[in-house]
Amino acid sequence: MHDTAAIMRASEVKNASFIGKEVTIRGWVHRLRKQKENSFILLRDDRGGVIQCVLPTDKAAGLTIESSVQVTGIVSQDPRAPEGGFEIKGKELKIFNIAAEYPIGEYQSDELLLDKRHLALRTRKMIAMAKVRASVLHYGRRWFVENGWMEVTAPTIVKGAVEGGSTLFKLRYFDQDAYLSQSAQLYLEAMIFSLGPVWSLTPSFRAEKSRTVRHLAEFSHLEAEAPWVTLEDILKVEEQLVSYVIQNTIKERAEELEFLKRDVSGLKKVEPPFERVPYGRAIEILRSKGFQVTEDDGTKREIQFGDDLSIDSERELTKDADKPVFVVGYPIAVKPFYVKEDPEHPGIGLTADMLAPRGFGEITSGGQREDSIDSITSRMVKEGLKPEAYEWYLDLRRYGSVPHGGFGLGIERLVRWITNAEDIKDTVLFPRTMSRVEP
Amino acid sequence: MHDTAAIMRASEVKNASFIGKEVTIRGWVHRLRKQKENSFILLRDDRGGVIQCVLPTDKAAGLTIESSVQVTGIVSQDPRAPEGGFEIKGKELKIFNIAAEYPIGEYQSDELLLDKRHLALRTRKMIAMAKVRASVLHYGRRWFVENGWMEVTAPTIVKGAVEGGSTLFKLRYFDQDAYLSQSAQLYLEAMIFSLGPVWSLTPSFRAEKSRTVRHLAEFSHLEAEAPWVTLEDILKVEEQLVSYVIQNTIKERAEELEFLKRDVSGLKKVEPPFERVPYGRAIEILRSKGFQVTEDDGTKREIQFGDDLSIDSERELTKDADKPVFVVGYPIAVKPFYVKEDPEHPGIGLTADMLAPRGFGEITSGGQREDSIDSITSRMVKEGLKPEAYEWYLDLRRYGSVPHGGFGLGIERLVRWITNAEDIKDTVLFPRTMSRVEP
Ligand SMILES: [Mg+2]
Ligand SMILES: [Mg+2]
């Protein structure tokens, strides 16, 4: 294990106090340059750190890219050594495995890198992405723990739809049909009656037939629900959570974000409060800029009150922002049945989406849930859903219903914004999309 | 939200410093006794705490079990008051919702409680179980974070089997077939080459056609994998992890475990090291007790070297133990293809299962993985698997293979042992079994 004192990592070795000392490091041949006398190995340790190791070429003759090795040698400083000016003058080389000819070269198509994702994870870009992701998961959970919310686990295999039937994955569950969960929300709602403010972080699934840079068929969903909350209470939680995750992540992953060339000056400004833009105002802004929407038949027209916001309209609204923006009070007609109607503004939902700045789009969606049995039943009927299929969920309104609300946050969308990743596929280790379920 | 100073929870109110003071508490009517003059409400707050509220019966006339209410009144001490001798002499009652006639009474069949699981979560037993579970999840993750392991997320939708094809759930993934993951292990193995010691906590799925008190079709799987580890390294991690989770959980959930009547004196003794019993010795012990196994055709015979251990044999081996026991070195014939064969003991795997004491059975399984491309390919062929279906996994042995190992821990099995639950279904909020995918 790594705590055996003898074996070190690159980040430990690259330290002036080790100059002239003998160290042992283990890892993989990340880059290799063989000269007549000496060979230069850029060794990647098991946390993705790298350091140059110099070995006599006769010793290193058999080495190939990605061979696994252990090098013992003397640490020295050489300004020409890449990645920090330290190198190890190798005395002993132990070889674990000579890698076959490596199928990934320096310039590769994105498709090949996705086909060989199990190997592409060894690129330093993916290593940096993975570490940022780990921090986002960690601080996302930690905010809830520190603020006294209770963790729960909702099932992934379910019978009913949350977000609509068209994006459901169907599976054979013993002798019946079932589906993969689109959201834990309905289950979290059941838990607030005895566990209070609750949260979960589980995979959600959407069989979206869109090939975009912000959709995954499987994603990590951080969801929360609490009794006796207003929409404004929920927005306060969301802006605190997102700010906390970002500030801690850019501190913990400063090195990785620098490697990814992410300028974090904008992220540093992310702190509560986030601007609340009423949906009607958002439409006005878009109209004042002549924003067009495309109808199903291909014709274009100006955006109008009642339209949902597309990624293009979200980009327009946030292109100059540094902080996320809440669009508040969408028409209930464009939102799911469980969104509570604002009693003071009929037709408007007590709901908000958080849009990340600079066009990264929606990262959370949340609000108050309809708590009246009559209202929610008639909303279901209006949307063509069968209330009978939701009997257990309706029970939550029959037995001690209380005002309540919550939200869901897409981890990958948040990671995409933090890392400035062009494609959301890079925020997960093994992406699942319409065309990709392997490796 | 709960941080509005005005609203308190039962555990806060039950404090001598509040006697004579006015407080407001919110929750549900957990029990109800109406007398001529006064009505006695056992109010359950949103964290499952309870306190008696006394109200004039004319005010409380319409109340029913599980109605949601808010009571304002004066805290007083009364030794007759249940659950701690405190009560609230109610002055104001606000009703959120009068519950319909509650379908769960005091004595109900297990089946009805499972059918109404969304309501049965409000029983104090399930509340206690949920809180223990939350602590186990929390400390399970925290051990890895504190010890420098990196969190990763493996996909849940996959193409290949880890544990064998008979327990796979199949689903339609756009225009192809795919499966639900049985374990993240193969993916975790891919990640050790650049992220080092890694862990994940994701759902795993087994379409087990067994109706037992220790099988779930969907379970929470805490898995870990690391490069350059021996079997003994892995066992040390496992015993430290399990001891850490247990000691922290029994401290944090002392009240809940007491409510569940769990005597924790045995659990307090759980600390490293755990006994290592070689598989061969385990068989000898069972034979010395005349332990029988039942063949597929129903005939019985004495257990012998080469047999897998059943739950009955696991119970026999651990019935007097306070600490878990590792059974080490199973024959590779009863273990999956990826288990590494002990070079010094052909036929024996560098693998171990951790058996919980008192017959709670296997809670972890782990060991070294076969790292040679030739050995693992021939093992696959011997087990009737097609190596072509595992090309990406075999690449891990082609490009820089290193000795490595890991393990998986079933969260629900650990919770079952900690809580002494008879049925594993009680360790999850919405269990998934052969006959149950709802609610
Ligand atoms: Mg939207
Ligand atoms: Mg076993």
Image (spheres, coloured by chain):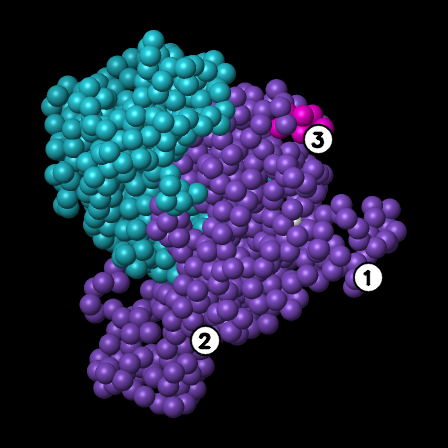
Chain colours: A purple, B cyan
Q: Residue at x 44, y 34 (%)?
A: A192
The residue nearer to you, when weighing B411 against B349, is B411
Q: Are tags 1 and 2 found on a single chain?
A: yes
> How far apart are the two marked residues, 1 and 2, measured between alpha carbons?
52 Å
Residue B288 x/y as whole percent = 11, 23
Q: Badge 3 is on which residue?
A: A383
Q: Assess mark 2: CB under 8 A from ligand 1?
A: no
Which tag is nearer the camera, tag 3 or tag 2? 3
For marks 1 and 2 on the same chain, the one whose residue lies earlier in the sequence: 2
Q: Badge 1 is on which residue?
A: A290
Q: What element carries label 3?
A: loop
The residue nearer to you, when weighing B316 against B255, is B255
Residue type (three-letter) at the residue carrying disc 2 = Arg
Q: Which residue is drawn at 45% across and 28% down?
A: B94
The quarter holding residue A150 reads: top left
Above or below residue A240? Residue A34 is: below
Q: Assess mark 3: CB under 8 A from ligand 1?
A: no
Contact (CB < 8 A) between labels 1 and 2?
Answer: no
Residue B199 x/y as whole percent = 36, 51
Q: Dividing the image into 4 quarters, which one contains the N terminus of chain A? A: bottom left
The chain under label 2 reads A
Q: Badge 2 is on which residue?
A: A31
A380 magenta-colored: yes
